[in-house]
């Protein structure tokens, strides 16, 4: 029996999927998470999960952070993003960050089932009407995604705090580490993003819809 983890902070949506998916994907063991912390805890207790259905805006995920964290910590675990945000740039970036599928929340249940079955079979999936439009996405946004995917989860967290204008000491206090650790993270971020300053790093981040 397949084991699928539904990671979404809306109980009604999780309940709807739990009720709707078995008829279209067959016998399945459904697990639930409502935040990044609970998501990671459930995965640690269930290392045989076959698929994560991930909401981009679930608490702790900070849009792409949850996806980046899963791709970094569990690279063999397939992730399908389910989101109400159908912006083409976001979808293209989601796929660049390693998702196997992007499923709009407006998708019919039968098509959600088809997407899940495709991912479980080792394939990728996108709605046909969206897949044909992705070539129109701005290259700058996709190039930013390519660079950002090289960051570790900690480095991504530091970058987000830089975007919010925090200084090194504030970031160190927030993350409960030393300022020297934050400086090392920032140096690594600059190198991976090929930038020389905080301003350049933040401008690159602005090419993504992170907020």
Image (spheres, rainbow, N blue to C red):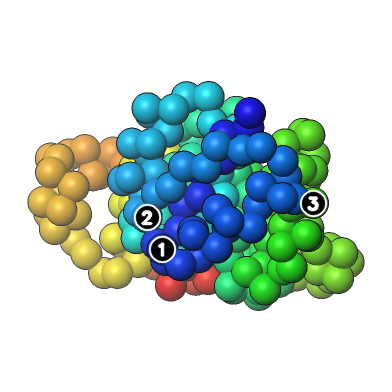
Residue pictured at 53% horizontal, 24% vertical: 48
Q: Which mark is residue 77?
A: none
Q: Residues within 10 Å of mark 1 (few under 14, many from 20)?
A: few
Q: Is residue 93 above or below residue 52?
A: below
Q: Quadrant of residue 155?
A: top left
Q: Which residue is mark 3?
A: 114
Residue pictured at 52% horizontal, 42% vertical: 30
Sequence-wise first label, 1 or 2: 1
Sequence-wise first label, 2 or 3: 2
Is disc 1 in contact with disc 3, using a CB cutoff of under 8 Å?
A: no
Image coords of residue 90 (percent x, y): 62, 67
Q: Nearer the viewer, residue 88 or 22?
A: 22
| C-alpha separation, residue under disc 1 versus residue under disc 3 | 23 Å
Is disc 1 in contact with disc 2, using a CB cutoff of under 8 Å?
A: yes
Q: Nearer the viewer, residue 147 or 96?
A: 96
Residue pictured at 55% horizontal, 37% vertical: 29
């Amino acid at each position: 029996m397949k084991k699928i983890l539904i990671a979404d902070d809306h109980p009604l949506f999780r309940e709807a999927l739990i009720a709707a998916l078995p008829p279209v994907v067959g016998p399945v063991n459904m697990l639930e998470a409502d935040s990044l912390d609970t998501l990671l805890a459930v995965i640690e207790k269930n290392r045989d999960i076959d698929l994560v259905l991930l909401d981009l805006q679930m608490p702790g995920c900070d849009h792409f952070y949850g996806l980046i964290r899963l791709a970094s910590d569990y690279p063999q675990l397939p992730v399908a993003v389910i989101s109400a945000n159908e912006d083409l740039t976001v979808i293209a970036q989601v796929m660049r960050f390693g998702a196997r599928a992007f499923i709009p929340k407006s998708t019919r249940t039968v098509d959600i089932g088809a997407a899940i079955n495709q991912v479980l079979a080792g394939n990728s999936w996108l709605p046909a009407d969206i897949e044909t439009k992705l070539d129109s996405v701005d290259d700058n946004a996709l190039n930013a995604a390519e660079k950002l995917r090289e960051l570790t989860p900690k480095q991504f967290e530091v970058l987000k705090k830089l975007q919010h204008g925090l200084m090194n000491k504030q970031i160190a206090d927030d993350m409960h580490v030393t300022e020297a650790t934050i400086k090392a993270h920032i140096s690594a971020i600059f190198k991976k993003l090929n930038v020389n300053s905080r301003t350049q790093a933040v401008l690159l981040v602005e090419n993504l819809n992170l907020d």
